[in-house]
Image: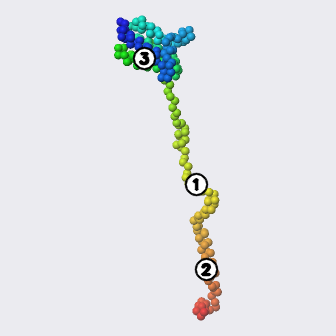
């Protein structure tokens, strides 16, 4: 069974849209590098890595000549053009970027036409991604600055500066030291000094006279 005339027309429309796709700014056709196969003599390693090489011009010719028995086969070949480019080229290269853009155009335009069967969005079984057991090339992740762990730790462990200024040397020198506790020897010495001072203020005792204590007593009374 071949594809219907309506399906053929729908597929041709999708291909023409892919070929005419240009970037948002500029007139460069993104499909230019995908129209023909790469030269085998110049890129022998490409044919060693890519199991099923495909190009847009060859697919257009097959559609025109009714070589496709199923519309999904045409879709598979178209998707392989871009899956192959994504696998072989660096993710951040221009050709990989263009391939991703055109693959999205293929998926979007194909789904707009209800007459065409629902396509698959994963790599086909014959793709390099499936054969070599790797997934499609992922876009590069943007670099995000992260705070330094060592800096954060240092800030958290730094002791706060005291708001009270330290005492100057002059202030320390003028400070009067406090007396320590008075010892027992110092207290005895102070008592003896007080006793000597009192003796100086009292009249000296002449001792006991011939008449004894009574004579002294009388003399004191007479005075």
**Dot 1 alpha-carbon crowd within 10 angstroms: few under 14, some 14 to 19, many 20 or more:** few
Residue with the mark numbered 2 = 198
Q: Quadrant of the N terminus?
A: top left
Mark 3, residues whose alpha carbon is within 10 Å: few (<14), some, or many (≥20)? many
Judge by depth and name the residue closer to the eye, 194 or 107: 107
Which residue sits furthest front? 27
Check whether the beta carbons of the residues at disc 1 and disc 3 lie within 8 A of each other.
Answer: no
Say which element carries label 2: helix
Mark 1 or mark 2, whichever is nearer to me: 1
Estimate the spatial distance between the alpha carbons at disc 1 and disc 2, rounded to whole Å: 54 Å
Viewer-proximal residue, 200 or 39?
39
How many marks do you count on the picture?
3
Q: Is residue 188 visible?
A: yes
- The residue shown at (48%, 23%) is 24
Comes first in the chain, label 1 or label 3: 3
In terms of sequence position, does the residue under pointer 1 or pointer 2 come before the other? 1
SS at circle 1: loop
Residue 143 percent location from the top left of the image: 52, 30
């Amino acid at each position: 069974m071949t594809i219907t005339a309506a399906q053929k027309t729908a597929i041709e429309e999708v291909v023409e849209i892919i070929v005419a796709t240009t970037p948002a700014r500029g007139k460069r056709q993104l499909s230019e590098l995908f129209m023909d196969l790469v030269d085998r003599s110049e890129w022998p390693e490409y044919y060693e890595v890519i199991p099923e090489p495909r190009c847009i011009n060859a697919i257009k010719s097959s559609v025109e000549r009714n070589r496709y028995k199923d519309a999904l086969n045409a879709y598979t070949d178209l998707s392989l053009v871009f899956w192959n480019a994504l696998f072989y080229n660096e993710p951040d290269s221009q050709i990989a970027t263009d391939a991703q853009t055109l693959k999205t155009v293929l998926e979007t335009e194909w789904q707009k036409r209800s007459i065409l069967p629902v396509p698959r969005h994963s790599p086909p079984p014959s793709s390099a991604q499936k054969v070599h057991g790797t997934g499609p090339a992922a876009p590069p992740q943007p670099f995000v600055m992260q705070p330094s762990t060592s800096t954060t730790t240092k800030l958290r462990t730094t002791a706060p500066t005291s708001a009270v200024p330290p005492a100057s040397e002059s202030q320390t020198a003028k400070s009067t030291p406090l007396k320590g506790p008075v010892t027992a020897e110092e207290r005895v010495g102070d008592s003896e000094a007080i006793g000597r001072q009192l003796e100086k203020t009292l009249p000296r005792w002449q001792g006991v006279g011939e008449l004894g204590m009574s004579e002294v007593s009388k003399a004191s009374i007479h005075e």
